[in-house]
Structure formats: structure tokens, C-alpha cells
């Protein structure tokens, strides 16, 4: 079991949801309001630092998670999104 973890530009959430549905993701959890700072700047979603972030988590079997990760990266790169970051992590236990 793996988890695909995605930190994305909140403005892209609807497109990402459509991608997940199209790709047959088994489900996802979204945390729609994140703040942060890093290589792509400050993301606070306010007037001074517009552009909030959203976090999505998708748990899937190893092969499905790897395929989903690869396709999400490809789609991110196709739209030249320089904010979104994707990670694939092991899931030790799930209950």
C-alpha cells in the first residue's frame, strides 16, 4: 500500500479532482486550505500573498499508486504547473 501526497495550487483543485476521477483513483482526502513558504514563494491565500495551497492524499495499492503518481506528474508538467509537488510514501498500516 502506498499514499500519493500532493501539495497543489488551490486554483487547480477542480482540474485535479477531474483528473483523479478520470484516472480511476480509489478515493482521496483533500485539505483545502494550507499555508506555506518554500521554493515557490509564500502561499498564504491572502491579499499580500495570493495563491493558497491544497493537500490531497490518495491511498492505493503499490502498482496503482505508482501509475497514478506517474500520470499526475505528467499532467502537472503538461500544464507547466511550477507549484504542485507530488510524493509517494509507504503506508505501514491502515485500519
Image (cartoon, rainbow, N blue to C red):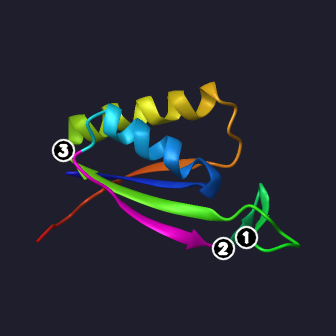
Q: CA distance from mark 2 to mark 3?
A: 30 Å
Q: Residue at x 50, y 62 (%)?
A: 55
Q: Assess whether mark 2 and mark 1 are in contact (beta carbons under 8 angstroms).
A: yes
Residue 30 part of the magenta-drawn span:
yes
Q: Give me the disc on residue 35.
A: 2
Check if residue 65 falls in the magenta segment.
no
Vertical placement of residue 66 versus 41, above or below: above
Circle 1 residues within 10 Å: few <14, some 14–19, many ≥20: some
Q: Give the residues drawn in magenta, as a range.
A: 26-35
- Given residues 91 and 12, the one toward you in this image is 12
- In this picture, residue 62 sits left or right of residue 22: left
Front residue of 3/35: it is 35
Q: Residue at x 51, y 67 (%)?
A: 32
**Circle 3 sits on which residue?**
61
Q: Where residue 86 appears, x then y in whole percent?
A: 51, 48
Of labels 2 and 3, earlier in sequence is 2
Q: CA distance from mark 1 to mark 2?
A: 7 Å
List x then y, in percent, for residue 33. 57, 72
User: In the figure, 85 relative to 44: above or below?
Assistant: above
Q: Which residue matches tag 1?
A: 45
Amino acid at each position: 500500500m502506498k499514499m500519493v501526497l500532493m501539495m497543489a495550487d488551490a486554483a487547480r483543485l477542480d482540474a485535479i479532482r477531474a483528473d483523479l476521477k478520470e484516472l480511476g483513483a480509489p478515493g482521496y482526502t483533500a485539505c483545502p486550505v494550507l499555508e506555506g513558504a518554500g521554493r515557490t514563494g509564500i502561499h498564504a491565500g491572502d491579499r499580500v500573498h495570493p495563491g493558497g495551497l491544497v493537500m490531497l492524499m490518495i491511498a492505493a495499492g503499490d502498482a496503482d499508486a505508482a501509475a497514478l503518481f506517474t500520470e499526475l506528474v505528467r499532467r502537472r508538467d503538461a500544464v507547466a504547473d511550477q507549484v504542485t509537488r507530488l510524493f509517494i510514501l509507504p503506508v505501514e498500516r491502515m485500519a
